[in-house]
Image (cartoon, coloured by chain):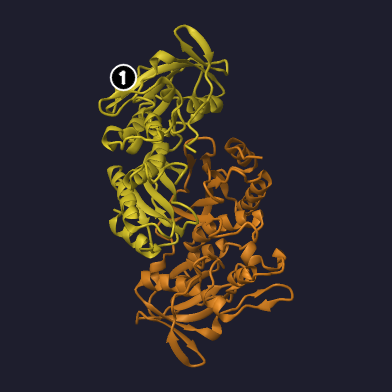
Chain colours: A orange, B yellow
Amino acid sequence: MPLGEKSLIARIRRQAVRGSAVVAGIGDDCAAIRVPRGHEALITTDFSLEGIHFRRQWHPPESVGHRCLTRGLSDIAAMGGEPIAAFLSLALPRDLRQPWVDRFIGGLLALAKQFDVTLAGGDTAESPHGILADIAVLGSVPKGKAVLRSGARPGDRIFVSGRLGGSSATLRRLMRPSHEKLNRRYFPRHFFPEPRVALGRVLREKHLASAMIDMSDGFSTDLHHICEESGVGAQVYADAIPLAEIGRPACQVDFLSALHGGEDYELLFTAPNNLQIPRDISGVPITQVGQITRDRKLLLTTNGTVRDLKARGWEHFK
Amino acid sequence: MPLGEKSLIARIRRQAVRGSAVVAGIGDDCAAIRVPRGHEALITTDFSLEGIHFRRQWHPPESVGHRCLTRGLSDIAAMGGEPIAAFLSLALPRDLRQPWVDRFIGGLLALAKQFDVTLAGGDTAESPHGILADIAVLGSVPKGKAVLRSGARPGDRIFVSGRLGGSSATLRRLMRPSHEKLNRRYFPRHFFPEPRVALGRVLREKHLASAMIDMSDGFSTDLHHICEESGVGAQVYADAIPLAEIGRPACQVDFLSALHGGEDYELLFTAPNNLQIPRDISGVPITQVGQITRDRKLLLTTNGTVRDLKARGWEHFK
């Protein structure tokens, strides 16, 4: 059953709830959206490409739709912003069956509803090869209050939310030549990662974070991004990095997955030394894992031994 | 020479001019952008996929970059808006050579500069197959003043800007098995279409248009969109449709290219009967081609004969 663009758009229009900020949505040349008074618009775009970001045989369609939108929401969270609307560009191969698309859209819209985000537009096309999605998310933040990557200062402490490595360690299990079928319920951080929107907002409102980024590329790479934009270095305590648990029975991930593995969508932020950072914010555990330094190197301390911390972020599976 | 994402982002950052509305641009999780006070944000996204929207052997990289951004700017124009910033998601095959990307970005940035638009963000990825681009454009329009597709009323006259069919007739020449190499200078509406931003703004400011759309799919299909969203029909006068001229010596395109051919990026709008519409606005000729009717059919009148006008918009080349 070939997929008609028209039917796809009609289906999305029927299912998507329109938020009050959305003046014109799907069905016009552009969406028209009210950004709250005194706020700036935040915009981010992220690909989800079959064979690069997901595989049909590994990822159920609901998970692909959920992860697609998470990528955008997580970027809004990392600025301390509020998401408002999403725009989906979706190119589908001619032979793709309708149920896959329905379930993909279902997964995306379920997450959108949870965060009160309107799917307000996008584009559809035939794909020459594989499923291609690109999500744009529009959000807002009070003027001048966005938490940037460039605000880290020497002496600031480095924090992460949640536990790291769960997503990439799951991916490694999927990549095993003869992997068992994973029950996605026991691997939520890989199949249905929750963007840390509430946490990002609290950190911004309470002025707790001097710099922030979401960990999509992996801790080591994302810390490099913070240090590069801020013109600083960092010292990381290997022992302090919180390791995720995956599967049933629950099993702690290896250290390298936590250090370099991407797509956890947890937040990495820095905080001035004089501020008290709670151990739990919006129900998410917060852990100090290091300190910002003046010297622009990134160092990892393990049992008293200090070595360079290279950015070895996850570069998607090949 | 494989293309490094990092070098691509660095190059764009170096070349892109940052407009004053852009508070934070490339190099953070999101771009932060000030929407003018009293304005709404307009957002649109459009794919440019190799093999669907362009072919490397037909389209020089500058043209692909130009057309990619035109798709977004034209949507902003069709709402009567002002473009502010663009966001490029770009996935490239591993073996693509650097000069292609440089020339693509060059074509895109040249058009961005012309319209004072900042390339403020996006995403990069490896493509599993072919060059994949998705452009998002953010613009603004005074609150409640966007010209929608849904405003056409019975009795309104139907107008088009410019001349139609130039882009698709060029495409047909390119598709000839042994086509001559086209000098792109003589086929500007195909290779370097100019989005009608100034015209759209004037129509909105002077309250001349009751409904508007940009002709990306083709006149017949885009008129259907207007009629569907407005709940009306239309009568079109075949004789009145302005045919484009292409090539050197200049040659008028066939009627069907003008009627159905896509990607001209001219504006199609309706105007209440009591308003005087100039024959030229912002240097672009304006032609009445029909009238909106209460009866929800679309009809084409040729030499006194009336027949149904089917939506046969260009569905990309296969």
Q: Residue at horizontal 56%, vertical 26%?
A: B228
Q: Position of residue B196 (x, y in %)?
A: 35, 33
Q: Residue A290: tell me if it is visible.
A: yes
Q: What residue type is labelled 1?
A: Arg
Q: How many marks?
A: 1
Give the labeled residue for mark 1. B279
| Image location of residue A211, percent across then percent down | 43, 69
Q: Callout 1 environment at 10 Å: few (<14), some (14 to 19), or many (20+)?
A: few
Dot 1: element: loop
Residue A118 against residue A275 in the figure, above or below? above
Q: In the rendered view, would you say A63 is above or below B59? A: below
Percent coordinates x, y for residue B130 in the rendering: 46, 52
Q: Is residue B190 above or below residue A190?
A: above
Question: Pointer 1 indicates a residue of which chain?
Answer: B
Q: Would you identify the image quadrant in which residue B190 lies? A: top left
Who is closer to the viewer here, A60 or A200? A60
Residue closest to the eye, A26 or A53: A53
